[in-house]
Amino acid sequence: MPFKVTVPKKIQNLLTPNAREGLVSETRKEFSRRGTKKVKQAIVQDMIKGISPVKGGGKWKKYSPSYKDQIRGKVRFFRKGGRVVAIKAKRGKRIENNVTKTASPTKQISPVNLRLSGGLHRSLKVFTRGGFLTNFRMITQFKNKLADIHNRLGAGKSKVIRRLLPTRRGERFNNRIEGVIFTELKKAADYVAKQFSGQ
């Protein structure tokens, strides 16, 4: 997601060309230092609420019955010899921790928050690149392979798509997340402008 950082005219008139470039450069650094953390928080907050961070994505589709059973500890799935095998709990019991990974204590059936173990959420990275000879860009990506399954390939037997990031042409973050991005850019610019003006 590229950004254009400009210096307001009233500040431009007070600065030399080198100082103007310095102001833009420092604004980018300030956004990279603080703004990216706020953007990551906003994305995760929407995910926890079961809302797609992608504009138009809305609320995510409900979990399948088998996944609900996994959350409740009634069944665990694992791969064995190239196929998926299920272990079911005895009636009225839960599968013990040593069988396989258990659900996160914060895992719920509703809202759909894709937080069985928490690994997907923790794998989100938000950082910036460029800014001198190239466009200043904010990069958002998940390191967990489940992100691609939910976002593009489809999860489960019914291949349910739950959009996590705006990766398709013309897609954008939802209005709330875009609002956070531009608020943080403005905060960074205001902070740096005050430093340059000596206030």
Image (cartoon, rainbow, N blue to C red):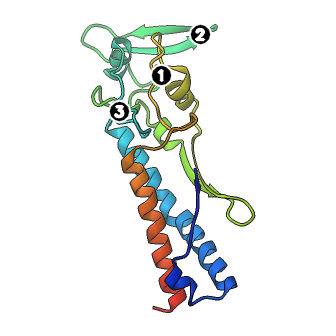
Q: Residues within 10 Å of mark 3 (few under 14, many from 20)?
A: some
Report if the CB atoms under discs 2 and 1 are less than 8 Å apart: no
Q: Residues within 10 Å of mark 2 (few under 14, many from 20)?
A: few
Report if the CB atoms under discs 3 and 2 are less than 8 Å apart: no
- When the figure is inspected, residue 135 is found, relative to residue 107, above or below; the finding is below
Question: Label 3 amino acid?
Answer: Gly
Q: Which of marks 3 and 2 is in front?
A: 3
Q: Nearer the N terminus, badge 2 or badge 1?
A: 2
Q: Mark 2 points at which residue?
A: 80
Question: Label 2 amino acid?
Answer: Lys
Q: Is residue 59 left or right of residue 55?
A: left
Q: Residue at x 45, y 68 (%)?
A: 186
Taking depth in this image into account, of 70 and 114 the one nearest to the observer is 114
Q: Residues within 10 Å of mark 1 (few under 14, many from 20)?
A: few
Residue 141 rendering spot, x and y as whole percentages: 57, 42
Disc marking residue 100: 1
State the quadrant of the C terminus.
bottom left
Q: Is residue 73 left or right of residue 98?
A: left
Q: Name the residue under label 3.
A: 58
Helix or strand or loop: what does disc 3 sit on?
A: loop
Residue 85 rendering spot, x and y as whole percentages: 51, 8
Q: Residue at x 47, y 78 (%)?
A: 191
Quarter holding residue 118: top left
Q: Nearer the N terminus, badge 3 or badge 2?
A: 3
Question: Label 1 amino acid?
Answer: Thr
Residue 100 rendering spot, x and y as whole percentages: 47, 22
Q: Distance between the residues labelled 1 and 3?
A: 32 Å
Q: Residue at x 46, y 76 (%)?
A: 190
